Image (tube, rainbow, N blue to C red):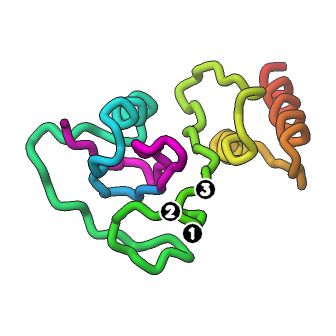
Amino acid sequence: MAEFKVTAAAVVAKVEDARREVYFYRGAVLPPIVSEAEARRLVAVGLVAEITDGPSAPEPQTPPPGNASGDGKALDPSGDGGAPVEPQTPPAGDGAEVDIDGLTVAQLRDYAKAHEIALNGAISKDDLRAVIKAASQATQA
């Protein structure tokens, strides 16, 4: 199997047992529990890169708040050994059409942040979609 290195700040990857997802942080090399198909999916959305010049040591990293390990290894964010985690998808920054209705709450927040859309206290998925759609229509007008 090819090796893949995380290039985004953080990635949520499905692992082989398919009942959970795991976080990996920038510089981490994806372990064998992440299937090659999943790794290639993450490459396609720009979150990881295939290592082509041979294996290399992961870059040192500063753990995010609440992560005491700081070792660049995958962390199970739920702490219960495998509860599902909502996957994160990067917001489209290249002008690509994005299906707002198909995004999760976290993805909607990421999209709004990337497009500098003020959420004005919106919390629910429906409210977030409405604010984003209104902002998109305002910029097109």
Q: Relative to residue 129, is residue 14 depicted above or below? A: below
Q: Amino acid at mark 2?
A: Asp
For mark 1, what is the residue? 79
Mark 2 residue crowding within 10 angstroms, few (<14) / some (14–19) / many (20+): some
Q: Position of residue 90 (x, y in %)?
A: 55, 39
Q: Amino acid at mark 1?
A: Gly
Q: Position of residue 76 (x, y in %)?
A: 50, 62
Q: Are marks 1 and 2 in contact (CB under 8 Å)?
A: yes
Q: Nearer the viewer, mark 2 or mark 3?
A: 3
For mark 2, what is the residue? 76
Label 2 sits on a secondary structure element that is: loop
Front residue of this view, candidates 32 and 130: 32
Disc 2 to disc 3, how far (Cα)? 8 Å
For mark 3, what is the residue? 83
Front residue of this view, candidates 58 and 75: 75
Part of the protein shown in magenta: 1-22
Q: Is residue 35 left or right of residue 110?
A: left
Q: Amino acid at mark 3?
A: Ala
Front residue of this view, candidates 111 and 41: 41
Q: Are marks 2 and 3 in contact (CB under 8 Å)?
A: no
